[in-house]
Image (cartoon, grey):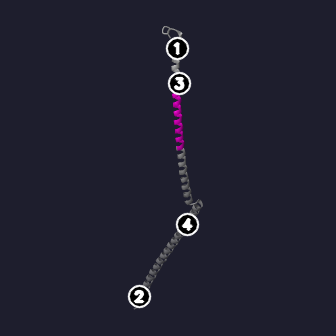
Amino acid sequence: MNKEIYKNDTDFTFLQHKYLDERFIFLEKMLSSTVLSQEKIATFSKEAAEKVLQKAESLAAHNQVISNEFRGQLKDQASTFITRLEVISRLENIDNKIVQTINEVNKLREYRVASMATVETKHIEKTNNEWMMGTVIALLSLLIAVVAIFFSLKK
């Protein structure tokens, strides 16, 4: 600072004190407004945290209710399902019926083969009988012709 502006040191000290007092008052106001702002922020934060906590508790209770309902539905569903032992028993029953059906089909095939063999045998026998009848008729015709020739030669 320039000494020409200030006539003596007391003026300088007075101005210095005045400046410092004004600065102190300004800083004090700033500090009080900052403290007030921080108190407002703290109050707002506390209220917001309480609201969030209430919402979270409400949501947790709602989720608990939904989970209990879901568990109840699963329990009801599980109680209506067929048990493992029942499934095994039914599958064994089905397997037995399949084996029984396969055995019956095999018996029917054997019977069909046997029937076809019988039909074939009867057909062969019929063919043999027809051949035999044809042969007998031919021999009788030959015999009649020979007898007729014999009688015609005798006359």
Does 94 sit left or right of 151 as displayed?
Answer: right
Query: Is there CB contact under 8 Å for labels 1 and 2?
Result: no
Query: Is there CB contact under 8 Å for labels 2 and 3?
Result: no
Q: What's the residue type where badge 1 is placed?
A: Phe
Q: Which residue is mark 4?
A: 97
Q: Which residue is mark 3?
A: 28
Whole-percent x, y for residue 136 in the image? 46, 82
Q: Which residue is mark 1?
A: 14
Q: Residue at x 54, y 40 (%)?
A: 50
Q: Secondary structure at mark 2?
A: helix
Pointer 1 or 2: first along the chain: 1
The residues bearing labels 1 and 2 have C-alpha atoms spaced at a distance of 186 Å
Q: What's the residue type where badge 2 is placed?
A: Ala
Pointer 3 or 1: first along the chain: 1
Is residue 99 shown in magenta?
Answer: no
Is residue 37 shown in magenta?
Answer: yes
Q: Secondary structure at mark 1?
A: helix
Whole-percent x, y for residue 68 in the image? 55, 52
Whole-percent x, y for residue 126 in the image? 47, 78
